[in-house]
Image (tube, rainbow, N blue to C red):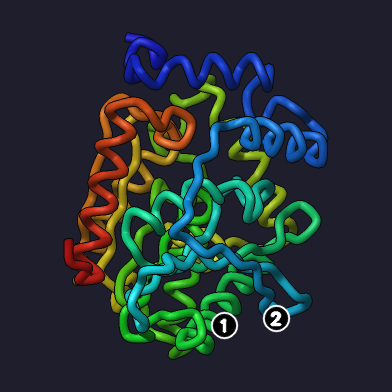
Amino acid sequence: MSLWDRIDEESKPALEILWGALPGGLNGIPDIVQRRAAYEAFRAAAPRGEYPNLDVSDHTYTGPETELSLRLYQPNNATAPAPGLIYIHGGGMIMGNLESQDEVLKITASELGIPIASIDYRKAPEHAYPAAPEDCYAGICWVFENASALGMDTHNIGLMGASAGGGLALAAALMLRDRDGPQLKYLLPIYPMIDDRHHTASSKTVVDIGIWDREGSIEAWNWYLGDAAPDAYAAPARAEDLSGLPPTYIDVGDLDLFRDEDILIAQRLSASGVPVEFHLWTGAYHASELFAPEAALSQRIWATRYAAIRRLAGIQG
């Protein structure tokens, strides 16, 4: 059975629309500036809702080398201090910004009724490792330092990221542990990008879906690492010690390039004494719930994530 035949039927039309807008898929445009522009134009064309009960504001935080952006999503009916969530967007370490996941985070903040801080970071190839994880570490520390003003309970802040953002969430969690930084309540690395080696079965078989395939992933990792030797903060799959991380939720599609490395990290986290919840979604490709949000599979994925966050953060209702 081909990869195409295994994809959830309701999630297939989104891929066909993507192929029409971006021939060759996300990585089909060689020039990174043009690729970013095409991707952002594609995402900007997606439907957007109205959220009258949500206050959205932009802030800056001081990174290691420059001022960086942060966006706060604050339900105006939330009682402070509320459980808080920090989010790191994806984009393969080379694309994406605060606009990329804006609609998703508006929906999530409204659904959960809690404030969410979305932090931006510098991208490769202009800014290779360790720029991104160091930026994220600084952003996380800024949120904790300003939690009262943001309406967040410093004892109940989780960290979530998807794809590259999931990898950065794991990297930042390791940095927080090793540097005696603020303590996260929980961690949600969603289909995280964590292994530069591309030696798993899934990394060798997912080659032509068009969302995030082997060739583009190798290119992104090469840009991201630059001349640096990969370590645990660059590629968390290389971490020798995963103990001491907060309770963790991970999910990934069975047609995702990152499937096997994510299964392995979940097993290793559990073996290290970290409470882990893991879900493997049959028929889901990389980020299918973002590209095909109306699919029943996508709605199950989000419902399961929301339930996990409510449980981990102790959110009632």
Q: Is residue 278 above or below residue 229?
A: above
Discs 2, 1 touching: Cβ within 8 Å: yes
Left of 122 or right of it: where is 205?
left
> What's the residue type where badge 1 is placed?
Trp
Give 290 or 1, whichever is nearer the viewer: 290
Disc 1 crowd rating (10 Å Cα; few below 14, some 14-19, many 20+) is some
Residue in the picture at 27% in, 55% down: 266
- Give coordinates of residue 293: x percent, y percent: 41, 32
Foreground pick, 34 / 260 = 34
29 relative to 32, above or below: above
Whether residue 231 appears in this view of the structure is no
Q: Residue 142 in the image: x percent, y percent?
A: 57, 82
SS label for mark 1: helix
Neighbourhood count class around disc 2 (C-alpha, 10 Å): few under 14, some 14–19, many 20 upward: few
Q: Is residue 187 above or below residue 65?
A: above
Residue 221 position, x and y percent, is 63, 48
Q: Which mark is residue 142?
A: 1
In primary-sequence order, the first of circles 2 and 1 is 2
Report how far apart the C-alphas of labels 2 and 1 lie in the structure.
Answer: 8 Å
Type of the residue with mark 2:
Thr
Kindly identify which residue carries mark 2: 62
Label annotation for residue 258? none
Closer to the camera in the image, 185 or 76: 76
Residue at the image point whose x is 36% and y is 39% from the top: 259
Q: Quadrant of residue 133?
A: bottom right
Observer able to see residue 174: yes
